[in-house]
Image (cartoon, helix red, strand yellow):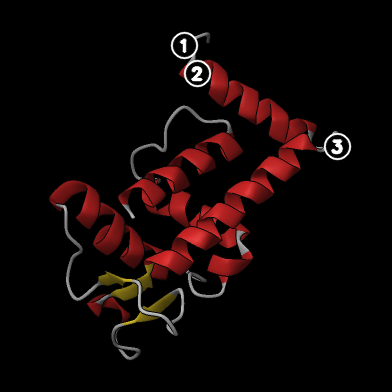
Amino acid sequence: MAIDCLLIETLQQFFNGTKRTGKDRDERTFHDFFSRSVDFSDFFDTIEKTKIFYVQIRCGILHQAQTKKMSTIHMKSGTPLAAWVDNSDHSKGISINRIKFHKALSESFENYITELRKDRNLNLRRKFERKMNMIANQT
């Protein structure tokens, strides 16, 4: 899940052609990524919902090596990609099916690669090139 979160940030940086996510734009970065994906956009349909994922899942794992509040990560079959721990109080946490989450993220990555290969997506290619140049330290 930590690697998936890093991949989301990196893919969004490539999509935007930016060097880094940027201070005070972190939740927005995840929300923008989730909004572009059919698999994620229905669940993470507001910045507030995305912020709960960002703080309780992403930041919890990457900064404390654990989820926060009541959020959980599991691989139980028959469960949705994501569900609220308490539908009446989203702030309590999210339950993430890591297998479905990773599959949806992989599909988003494949869709991005497919779009990059299309000749008509010159702007997307330029942003990819700008990000790659930043990585290679050529700009």
Query: Real-space Cα distance between discs 3 and 2?
Result: 24 Å
User: Which badge, 3 or 1, comes first in the chain's sequence?
Assistant: 3
Tell me the amino acid under the disc marked 3. Arg
Using the image, determine if residue 64 lies above or below residue 90.
above
Q: Which residue is mark 3?
A: 120
Q: Callout 2: helix, strand or loop?
A: helix
Q: Residue at x 44, y 44 (%)?
A: 7
Q: Position of residue 1 (x, y in %)?
A: 34, 55
Viewer can see residue 47: no
C-beta proximity under 8 Å, tags 3 and 2: no
Q: Residue at x 53, y 67 (%)?
A: 40
Query: Real-space Cα distance between discs 3 and 1?
Result: 27 Å
Q: Position of residue 30 (x, y in %)?
A: 45, 53
Q: Position of residue 95 (x, y in %)?
A: 32, 76
Q: Which residue is mark 1?
A: 137
Q: Dot 2 surroundings within 10 Å: few (below 14), some, or many (20 or more)? A: some
C-beta proximity under 8 Å, tags 1 and 2: yes
Quarter residue 9 falls in:
top left
Q: Callout 3: helix, strand or loop?
A: loop
